[in-house]
Image (spheres, rainbow, N blue to C red):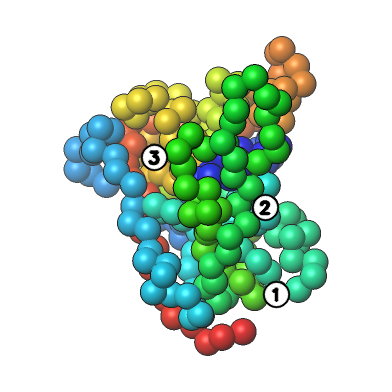
Amino acid sequence: MLASAALASAALCLGGCRGERRPDAAPGPTALSSVAPARAEEPRPSAALTPGSTPDWSRQVGRCVRLEGYAGGAKIGPQLLAPGFAVGVVLDDPGGDEAWAKLPTSGRVRVEGIVTERADLPVFVPKPGEPIEQGIPVPAGTDLEAARRRYVVERARVELLRRVADVETELGAAVGRELALGGVLWSMNGHYWFVHDGVELHLEGAEPEGGWGAFHGRTLELRGRLARRPMPRLDQILLKARPDLADAFVLDVKSTAPHPPWPLEPCAAP
């Protein structure tokens, strides 16, 4: 299933969480490689949410860059979701799209490749009374030639930075604790969930200003207490009026903040 992340739709992975709860997990601070312990200061107000900075891609054209983000997908191919922006990815072999599709959705990855500019976004202006075209609708008056353009990381290599099994194990050990987690917010049919390094978490508690729907397909940092209990299966949202229950991680959200930025670095050309 696909969901919008920028102008295009980012792919959704709706599989249920399969990690097992560790009954010996004791409450208290945790120090995991990607699960940050919640800080002691007062929660940051949700209303303060602002998007992260987008790189000046025009200055990077023709250069090799290295950047981190979360694996997503779009109608026109793989896409890297990062704090403040999304960028297309073209892998360095004919089977690149298939290899990307095998990555866990919203799994944390590192990409290296050459920045180029393309004019291939399938944009169109809807016309009243006419059938909807295939592509990305844009408002009347839009400069279609400009709207077709996008930056892409080509000849790319990708590395999965965290295995889902490892992330599930770390989260299982942190059940009952208050954490600050980075990831991507997804929604479908009024259901909202958060994917942290490839692992899905159901959400409860405080919503940001504007509600979860305003942050669909965006990177966020959520702070809250982690639990694990039976919840409706996300992969059955469109299949059943009452999805089956399955053991899942649940985050009782206390506050929402912008995702911490990751640097864009130079690299050796592939």
Q: Earlier in the sequence, mark 3 or mark 2?
A: 2
Q: Where is the C terminus found, in terms of image quarters?
A: bottom right
Q: In what element is the residue under mark 1?
A: loop
Q: Mark 3 to mark 2: distance in Å?
A: 30 Å
**Residue 66, numbered label:** none
Q: Quadrant of residue 230?
A: top right
Residue type for callout 1: Asp
Which of marks 3 and 1 precedes in the sequence? 1
Image quadrant holding the N terminus, namely top right
Q: Identify the amino acid type marked 2.
A: Ile
* 3D distance between C-alphas at marks 1 and 3: 34 Å
Please report the residue visible at 38 percent of the width from the left and 35 percent of the height from the top: 224
Other residues around mark 2 within 10 Å, as few (<14) / some (14–19) / many (≥20): some
Which residue corresponds to mark 1?
92
Using the image, determine if residue 225 lies above or below residue 107: above
Which residue is under mark 3? 222
